[in-house]
Image (cartoon, coloured by chain):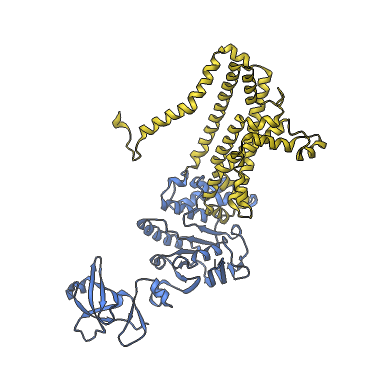
Amino acid sequence: MSIVVQNLRRTFGTFQALRGINLEIADHQLVALLGPSGSGKTTLLRIIGGLDFPDSGQGSVVINEEDVTDRPAAERKAGFVFQHYALFNHLSVFENVAFGLEVRPQKIRPGKDAIRDRVLELLRLVQLQGLEQRLPSELSGGQRQRVALARALAIDPKVLLLDEPFGALDAKVRKDLRRWLRAFHREIGVTTIFVTHDQQEALELADVVVVMNQGQIEQIGSPQQVYDHPATPFVYEFLGDVNKVRKPGRPDLFYVRPHEVRILFAGDAAAELHATIEHLFAAGPSARLTLRLQESRETLDADITRQQLEEMGLSEGDEVGIHLALSRS
Amino acid sequence: MQAKRPRSILPGFGLSLGFTLAYLGLVVLFPLLMVFVKASGLGWRGIFEALWTSRVWAACRLSFGLSIIAGLLNGVFGLLIAWVLTRYTFPGRRFLEASVDLPFAMPTAVAGIALTTLYAPNGWIGSLLKPYDIKVAFAPPGILIALVFIGLPFVVRTLQPVLEDFETAQEEASATLGATRWQTFRRVVFPQLVPALITGTTLAFARAVGEYGSVVFIAGNMPGKTEILPLLIITKLEQYDYEGATALAAMMLVVSFVLLLVINFLQRKTLVRNVA
């Protein structure tokens, strides 16, 4: 279902958490709200879910062409997965997932058997079959995460909202769950928004990345768009490694990603700048060089292939020439 | 044998357990044991005769009955007060917060005198109730009020930390799943408060059973009607009937112990489910 957010403002005391947010999300999309902490991404998510509200009269939230700005969470049918899952500690996995169905008014509440079937189906979907009698305290972090997801899905949500879904998990589980969530989203197709401060997570997982900073949206676009064509210096710096360099004789600042720095022999005529290799780190398919520019004394990171490293026979302390392989500024 | 003990990073198990047993024994169990030793001087028959009187039976019903009611009342209203004190900020909250502990701090006789002045037929509240023929002071309702008064802090103070630590995200989760506020309270919050609620209510009850100071002032102390068990024990002591007094005390101990044991058992059952 589509989501349209218009002109949203939210102030906490004197702190402006959101300063005029406009966002349109099409049906079935998987959207990442990406930004540093304090950028307002969680506040935006909570307002979409009905757990927080904009300053009075400041903006609107429309889900599926229905204005829900003043509707409480209970009426929005937005599945919300909390950062620390917020599972009901006293209820079993089964009861947690069944909760959203059990609390329905009698008229629209499914029968006991229907609830049972639905819960077991959901647990199968999140690969937790056989654990329905466990308590949340008896599960691992990744399992709790998936219980929270199944619980949110039980109400047939119009949208799925995930707050830092992988934040509390260790690196390995994170990666597995990320892959799993992408496949899962493809399968169920519910419009999904997730909040993250991890750029790699956002780029890898989302159809659309919304980059936020200081209560404002810096850029909206596909992962490739925001990575290759950052709209603002902030986006450039926040997404991936980046060097800020001045070319000799020019006042403007260049943004260069490490893989866009070409390393040449010191005497090469194409060299725009010259540097000394301060540190060399070669692990995996590429080598990372930390360079000290001779012209400005600034440091610069460069990634080159292992092959080039060997061919050029570089080591720490060597002098090299540099060509910047792009024209962006 | 030594080798069989599971290794633990916590040092001093033997020493601390030994100390605990010695301390509990000296401070709690040994004195209580003397009650039974003293009472046994009467022999079974003597004990039976000392206890099997209508006066004792009436006091017994009064004391345990009212204490249970007081514990339950405190459970309900203590929960309400703890809820308000932790969930809302309002002017005067700190004042209310501090006043919760007053029943702890005051000599109980002061409470008794204060309540009696208030509820006596010529007191502020007592005089209002008099035209309707409602008697509070010098009647069981007065005793109940005193018992509620001294038990309230137990419930509030045991519930407060649990409420303060409660993860609000669970309530939000409940709301996003479509639950009404009442459903959220009944299905999500309340069940997780039950263990602390039972503890608080039990403490309030236990305190009420043993309460003496505040009750004697307001009770009227009429044998068979408004005479509580602790008072009956004092009365027997004043008449130099030490064995009779200890027989009563032993009986109180046994009944209280059994009740606490049952409550503990119930609580264990709720805790097993709540372990988080």
Q: Is residue A157 above or below residue A131?
A: below
Q: Which residue ends up furthest to the bottom in the rendered image?
A: A249
Asked if residue B109 lies left or right of residue A153, the reply is: right
Residue B271 lies, in percent from the top left, at 50, 39
* Residue at figure coordinates x 25%, y 65% from the top left: A284
Q: Is residue A274 above or below residue A113?
A: below
- Image quarter for residue A316? bottom left
- Image quarter for residue B213? top right
Q: Colour of chain B?
A: yellow
**Is residue A247 in view?**
yes
Q: Colour of chain A?
A: blue
A94, B185: nearer the viewer: B185
Residue A53 lies, in percent from the top left, at 59, 64
Residue A198 lies, in percent from the top left, at 40, 65
Q: Quadrant of the C terminus of chain A?
A: bottom left
B105, A92: nearer the viewer: B105
Q: Is residue A191 above or below residue B119?
A: below
* Residue at figure coordinates x 51%, y 20% from the top left: B34
A17, A135: nearer the viewer: A17
B178, B271: nearer the viewer: B271
**Is residue A109 in view?**
no
Q: Quadrant of the N terminus of chain A?
A: bottom right
Residue B37 lies, in percent from the top left, at 51, 17
* Residue at figure coordinates x 63%, y 23% from the top left: B234
Q: Which residue ends up furthest to the right in the rendered image?
A: B131
Report the number of discs: 0
